[in-house]
Amino acid sequence: MYHKEVDTMKVGEARKLYSSQIRSYNMEKFKLGKEKTALEEKIKKTENGQIIYANEAATLELTYNAVAEKQKEYQDYMSQLMEQWQGKFDQVAAKENAEAEKEYFEDVGKILTVARRMMQGHTVPGSDEKKLMEYDDDLYKMAKNAQMMAQIREKKKYESLWEDEEERQREDAMEAADGQEAFASGPEVVNVQDTVAAAQASADVGQVADEQE
């Protein structure tokens, strides 16, 4: 018998745990549903079938309902959990996209500054020239030609525009969504076979009590 009290955990851990529970309960619910359909057909084809198979039908119905109820409990919790997960994911993704867009335009500004300096005949680091070439090869060639042809008295030698720039630590939206604390402790984790056994035992007790009346 497997029962587990669940404390608050990380969203990623809870998603994995309750996904597994939902999967096993869905499979059992599908199996019991087929058994119910088969029994209903048997009852229809059997004279006094409702009386003959009354106990079996009652046990199967009780078992199916117990499994369905527990499956719904897990599914409801998972739905709320996924809302929390999606909210955090969207928040971090939007922030990262905004940062990436900001960095892009900052880089474009630096690249155009490199092109202007080259066109004026000044010297820039090879790494900056490479960034210009990767951004726009035609603009790079134009700047390079202008640099070689420029006649200026004072040629400046510039440091890299990216030299002191530290690479920003990017936040992974999926890791952030999985790594947050779940909004609440999840339902008790009960093995599906234990739920089935408990429901069948309850049905047996009820049937014995009916027979003794």
Image: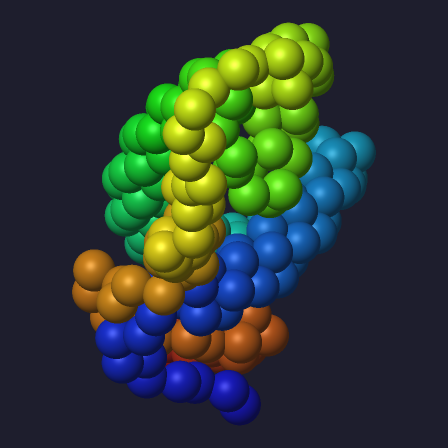
Q: As rendered, which of 42 and 96 lies closer to the eye?
A: 96
Q: Position of residue 200 (x, y in %)?
A: 53, 72
The outermost residue toward the left is: 184
Q: Nearer the viewer, residue 150 or 33?
A: 150
Quadrant occupied by the C terminus: bottom left
15 over 157 or under it: above or below: below
Seen in the image, is 205 located left or right of residue 138?
Answer: left
Q: Quadrant of residue 103?
A: top left
Taking the view exactly as shown, the residue that stands out farthest to the bottom is 1
Q: Does 75 appear above or below 18?
A: above
Q: Residue at x 52, y 37 (%)?
A: 124
Locate residue 10 relative to residue 13 in the image: left or right: left
**Res. 136 image quadrant:** top right
Report which quarter residue 104 is drawn in. Answer: top left
Is residue 158 at all visible to an observer of this figure?
yes
What x and y, as percent, mark residue 72? Answer: 39, 49
**What residue lies at 27% left-to-right and 80% top-to-bottom?**
7
User: Residue at (69%, 38%) from the top-left corner?
Assistant: 37
- Between residues 189 and 18, which one lies in front from this camera angle? 18
Q: Indicate whether 87 appears above or below 73.
A: above
